[in-house]
């Protein structure tokens, strides 16, 4: 599932900046490791400092605690304002519009679930 969504659907390539929501989920932990192995820069969101630390230990370049940090602002800062090339989202809801806001020109968004609902 991760290979298909990140590499086949999302087209992740070496040098891309990859944002994934739910960095400590099964999908997230696999995606972090694969993306790093293939040369991407990885940003992950997670819901606690301990989970953010786990993401860092798995290889993310930046882990964002979505409960007290704005992932759009933090990711834009990390990329010098450029934004991310690929977002893997399983949250939906309020993240839908924000995923567009954090995206670089010609970015891709792969939506795989709607834990926060299908409407923005």
Image (spheres, rainbow, N blue to C red):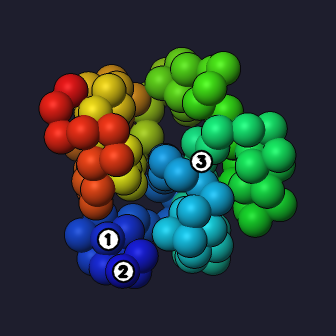
Find out whether the residues at labels 3 and 1 contact each other: C-beta distance under 8 Å.
no
* Residue to which mark 2 is pinned: 1
Q: Secondary structure at mark 3?
A: strand
Q: CA distance from mark 1 to mark 2?
A: 6 Å
- In-image side of 105 versus 16 (left or right): left
Q: Secondary structure at mark 1?
A: helix
* Residue to which mark 1 is pinned: 5
Q: Give percent across and percent down for residue 10.
A: 29, 64
Q: CA distance from mark 3 to mark 2?
A: 18 Å
Q: Residues within 10 Å of mark 2 (few under 14, many from 20)?
A: few
Task: Say if residue 103 shows up in the picture.
Answer: yes
Find out whether the residues at labels 3 and 2 contact each other: C-beta distance under 8 Å.
no
* Residue to which mark 3 is pinned: 44
Q: Quadrant of the C terminus?
A: top left
Which residue is pictured at 32% across the width and 26% down the height? 94
Q: Give percent across and percent down for residue 49.
A: 80, 38
Q: Nearer the viewer, mark 1 or mark 2?
A: 2
Depicted 100 relative to depicted 20: above or below: above
Find out whether the residues at labels 1 and 2 contact each other: C-beta distance under 8 Å.
yes
- In-image side of 96 versus 63 (left or right): left
Q: Residues within 10 Å of mark 1 (few under 14, many from 20)?
A: some
């Amino acid at each position: 599932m991760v290979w298909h969504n990140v590499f086949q659907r999302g087209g992740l390539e070496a040098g891309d900046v990859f944002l994934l929501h739910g960095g400590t989920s099964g999908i997230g932990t696999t995606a972090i490791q694969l993306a790093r192995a293939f040369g991407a820069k990885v940003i992950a969101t997670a819901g606690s400092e301990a989970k953010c630390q786990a993401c860092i230990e798995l290889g993310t370049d930046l882990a964002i605690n979505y409960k007290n940090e704005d992932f759009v602002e933090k990711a834009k800062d990390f990329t010098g304002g450029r934004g991310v090339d690929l977002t893997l989202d399983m949250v939906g809801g309020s993240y839908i519009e924000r995923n567009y806001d954090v995206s670089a020109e010609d970015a891709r968004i792969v939506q795989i679930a709607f834990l926060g609902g299908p409407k923005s």
